[in-house]
Image (spheres, helix red, strand yellow):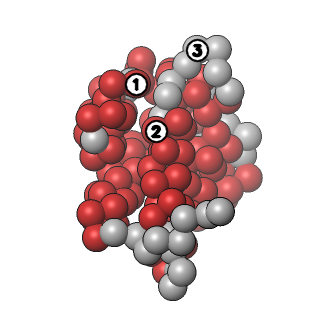
Amino acid sequence: MENKTAVTVGTLQQLRSVRQKLLQLHKVLLDYQTLIWERNGGRINNSYELLNLVMHSLEFSWLHRLSELIVQIDELFDADDATEATAVSLLEEVKLLLMPSEEGDEFQRKYFEALQESPDAVLAHSEVIGSLGKKARQIH
């Protein structure tokens, strides 16, 4: 039987904080990937061109998982029937997604590389993990 308890105020506050930190992390990772793109000779002339790359280029596709998770959090905020279990599950998804690994899936590998090469990514990662609480810091 699924838990139908409404999302608590504390969990909503935590999700809002995590979402804000994820947006910052996403921006840092987008900037990081843009720098790599341009370093490899692919000049980006305007924001429309960047948006097109983000949406359609394989080099940027690893960021989609993070974007999709942010959208899922936004959808929870808009849902009239959101449950505590769903909210907690989203927090767990954030923890799992942000586990960098040299041998992991594409996101984990690219994320690992970003954390090795970008101090800004390390700081943004730390902010997200901090907003997840003590348990999340123990697994990172």
Q: Is residue 38 visible?
A: no
The CA span between labels 2 and 1 is 8 Å
Position of the N terminus, as image quadrant, is bottom right
Q: Residues within 10 Å of mark 1 (few under 14, many from 20)?
A: few
Residue occupying the point 46% across, 54% down: 88
Horizontal placement of 115 versus 83: left or right?
left
Residue occupying the point 51% across, 85% down: 80
Query: Is 56 in front, or is 107?
Result: 107
Which dot, 2 or 3, sits closer to the camera?
A: 2
Residue 92: image location, x then y, percent: 49, 44
- Which picture quadrant has residue 3? bottom right
Query: How many numbered dots are placed on residues in this image?
Result: 3
Under circle 2, the secondary element is helix
The residue where tag 1 is placed is 139
The residue where tag 2 is placed is 95
Q: Which mark is residue 102?
A: 3
Query: Is 42 in front, or is 64?
Result: 64
Q: Amino acid at mark 2?
A: Lys
Q: Residues within 10 Å of mark 2 (few under 14, many from 20)?
A: some
Horizontal placement of 71 versus 15: left or right?
right
Position of the C terminus, as image quadrant, is top left
Q: Which mark is residue 7?
A: none
Residue occupying the point 52% across, 52% down: 89
The CA span between labels 2 and 3 is 17 Å
